[in-house]
Every structure is written in C-alpha cells, then in structure tokens.
Amino acid sequence: MMVGFDARAAFLDPHRGFGRVTASLAAALLRAAPGTVVVFVPHGARVPPEWYPLAARIVQLRRPRRAAFLVDPLAWRWTLGRRRVEVLHLPAWGVPPGLSGPVVATFHDATPFRFPSPPSRWQRLRARVGIRSLRRATLVHACSHHAAGELATYAGVPAARVRVVYWGVGAPFRPSPTPLPPRHLLFVGGDEPHKNLALVVEALTGVAAPPLLAVVPAGANSRVASLLQPLTSAGRAAVAVAVGDDEMVVLYQQAVATLVPSRNEGFGLPALEAMACGSPVLAANCGALPEVCGNAALLLDPNDPAPWREAIAALGQDASRRAALAEAGLARAATFTWERCAAALLEVYREAIRLASS
C-alpha cells in the first residue's frame, strides 16, 4: 500500500490545532509504515530531517498551497498524475472535485456552521464549502464521536462512510520528573467566540484567584487583549503568543488548572495535552470534551461562570484535589497515543482501497 499524505497544514498553520495534529500524525504514520508514505509539503518547507529516511518520498508542492483544494483542484490533480498513490489522506481543507482513486478526508468540527466567527463572509463560505466537500471522500475520518454526529447534520455524510479515530498525545507532553509549584491558571486558544474566553474572564473578575495566562496561536490574538482587560488592568492576566511545544509543556506543568470552556470542540487537544502533563483540567460539558476527558476532568456548564469560579477557588485551596485530578488525567491521557491513531488510520486507508476497487 502506497499512501499519500497531505502534510501542508503542519507548515502553513503550525500553531493551530489542525496544523499540530497534522505534523504529529505525519510523523506517526512514517514510524508505523516506513517506506510506504508519500508526504506532500509546501514548496520550500523545512521538513524534519527524521522524515526523509522513513518516507517513500517527500514531494514539495509549488501548487496547490493553502485552500487550493477549493480554488485550484486542477493543480492537485496534475501533481497526483505524476506522484501516484493508492490512497490519499487529506487531513485539512476539504476534498477537491475530480480526484481519481480512493480518498480519506478528516473532519475536525462544525464550528464554521455553529459559531461563524471569522470576520470575512468569504472565510466563512470557504470553511463551509470545505466541510461539505467531504461528501466526495471515499471514507471520512472523524476525530471523535461528537464530530461524527456533526458530520451527518452539517455535511450530509452517511454514518456508514465515517470512521472515528481519536488523535493522540506524545512527547514532549509529559509530567515534570520533579513537581513544579503551581503558578497560574492556563487558557489555550484564540479569540474565537466558541473558545469562550469571556466566560473565564467573568469567572475571575472580582474574586481572589491565581493569575490567568492565555496562550494563543499566532494571528489569533486580535481580541484577546481587549477580552482580558478587566484582569490585565489589575495585573492578574498575561498573554503568550505561539509558544513552542517544550515551553507549552512547562506552562501545563505549572498550571493550577487548565481551563477549556469551549462551547464546541471536535476533539479538545489542549485538554488532552494538559492531562498528559499532569495539569488538572476544568472543561466544558459539551462538544467532544466529555468524550475525551471522561471522568478525569471537572466538567462544567460553559454558559454559567459561577461553577467555574467555585471550582477554581476550590482547586486553588486543595492540593489533594489537584493531585487526584492530575493522577486521573495522566491515566486518561495514556490511552490516547499517536501510535494507536496511526495504526487505526492505516486500517482505514486499506478499507478505502477495498471500497474503491469493489
């Protein structure tokens, strides 16, 4: 089996969730099936050196680039005509028309339909068209059962063509070998309305609590400063932009708690990473967060700041409760590995090939 894997998101959006999972999945697939994966990257990308001996080929694309599956599918078809694969995995941006051969596409979430946060109508339309284009795929990979349910509602993809495979978490997301003193509350995400940073600010305004550190992807912090103003003016909040994984690990390890109040998540990578680093997690009781966190996090109403305020205060005063949540989180995170994800997706690729040939 020769697999084509579109890794462009790992280089074009390296600090956002789908770019980060694309990079981790590409590396896991290369380790799981050396010599069988053709990796497509943007022209001029700095490819990790360890990918080269494991890949069947690294193909640098002058075109298509970002969103080209929507605006220039001919360029992609031209590329595949010269770099033939038995199955193509498209983990971001949708499926262009007219591709020959089996295609597996990944669905992340229906946020562009449910929370139309991008300011441009064109951005919203492009995202929605990309999601609906998943109907062209042979099989669709959903990163959670919640996401699989959204697929039927917003994209019309039949359940029979959907396969749920969870993302993983791996190095360097591990607990500190020696416990670090808790220093802050941690929020990881951008300024999009569904990320719900406003609830955190409301929960913390006017009450005694550890300072809030908001870590946001590059280019996604336009409204974060204004949202945090009630806290930053009192010296109780700070913003870090696009920190690397190693720095992120330390921030998780030093967190009194990681706050994930999102109104919708197709998976919830920050919650999983936090648990893997031994950070207690407070998460919204909606989207895929209950599915990912299980009983290893405190699950709260994302529309009511009162229980968040109470839970934050309680954790700040109870080291034993923090330790119990951290232990439960470590056990839960250990069940989500990139090795398991890659092995399951390799089976999905084989199934897509069988379906296309039947």
Image: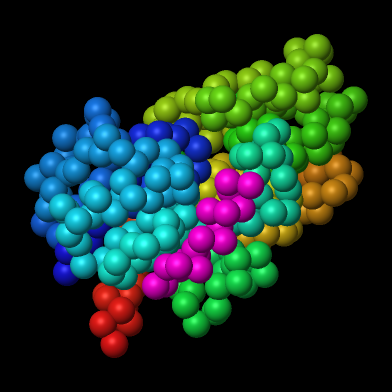
The C terminus lies in quadrant: bottom left
Residue at the (45%, 73%) spot, across then down: 163
**Depth check, front residue: 293 or 127:** 127
How many marks on residues?
Answer: 0
Q: Look at the picture and state if 176 lies above or below 69.
A: above
Residue under the image location 54 percent in, 79 percent down: 159
Task: List x then y, in percent, for residue 283.
Answer: 69, 50
Q: Where is residue 312? Give x, y as percent.
A: 76, 39
Residue in the image at 72% along x and 45% along y: 116
Q: Give the percent coordinates (x, y) of residue 20.
A: 42, 42
Magenta span contains residue 128: yes
Question: In the drawing, does residue 318 fall left or right of residue 53?
Answer: right
Residue 293 shows in the view: no
- In this orientation, which residue lies closer to the viewer: 246 or 221? 221
Image side of residue 82 versus residue 340, left or right: left
Magenta stretch encompasses residue 317: no
Q: Is residue 3 visible?
A: yes
148 vs 299: above or below: below
Q: Viewed as shown, does residue 96 lie left or right of 4?
A: right
Give the image quarter of residue 189: top right
Residue range in magenta is 125-142
Residue 201: x and y, percent? Answer: 80, 30
Residue at point 42% right, 38% down? 66
Q: Residue furthest bottom?
A: 358
Left or right side of 129 for 95: left
